[in-house]
Image (spheres, rainbow, N blue to C red):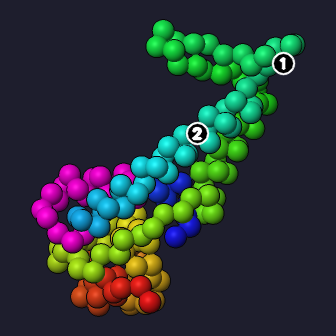
Amino acid sequence: MKTSYKRIIEFSRASGDYLKKFPKETKLKYALEKVRERCEPLFNTYNKKLSEIDLKHAKEDTDGCVLFTESSLGVRTYKFSKEGLVAKDAEIEEYFTDPENAEIEPFICTSLPKDLHESWLTPFEGFVLQSLSKEDVGLGSVEQTPTRPISKAKVKALSQKPV
């Protein structure tokens, strides 16, 4: 599935939180761990792109040499003009939120825990849960009921294998 790095990072954080809170072996835990493994190479790609964007907008001296400082550990920090910093931040935001920049293979979970709450749906949707509209399952907004257990109809719809 194509998605943004923003969604991948949201999934990664939420799945990490979920796995810490619910260490019990379930099909959902297995699916979360599988997709988290698939995220790792994407983080490396994202970090490389950030480095390219930094270099692209870094300040140069009159000879065209890039200006930077280097820490005692050898970490470079580029210097930016005000305009360069604004341009860099805008390009990073665009790259971060573009839903076409990353591709990851989902692992749809076919059995969900009975006590799974709706607050987990949004970050897991598309990664380990089917993407469904609220109308598909007849419930209101997830934000309105963050602690309500998922209905049986929604659990069934979310855990169906993709067509």
Q: Nearer the viewer, residue 135 or 9?
A: 9
Q: Is residue 39 above or below residue 85?
A: below
Q: Is residue 106 left or right of residue 88?
A: left
Q: Is residue 149 left or right of residue 131?
A: left
Q: Is residue 4 above or below residue 69?
A: below
Task: Indicate yes or no whether the magenta region holds residue 27.
Answer: yes
Residue 35 image-quadrant placement: bottom left
Determine the residue positioned at 40% across, 57% down. Answer: 38
Q: Residue at x 29, y 59 (%)?
A: 33
The answer to which quarter of the image holds residue 126 is bottom left
Q: Which residue is mark 1?
A: 64
State the extent of the magenta-drawn residues as a range.
10-28
- What amino acid is found at the position of numbered circle 2 in the picture? Lys
The answer to whether residue 14 shows anywhere in this view is no
Image-based side of 54 in relation to 124, left or right: right
Residue 117: say if magenta.
Answer: no
Residue 58 percent coordinates (x, y): 73, 26
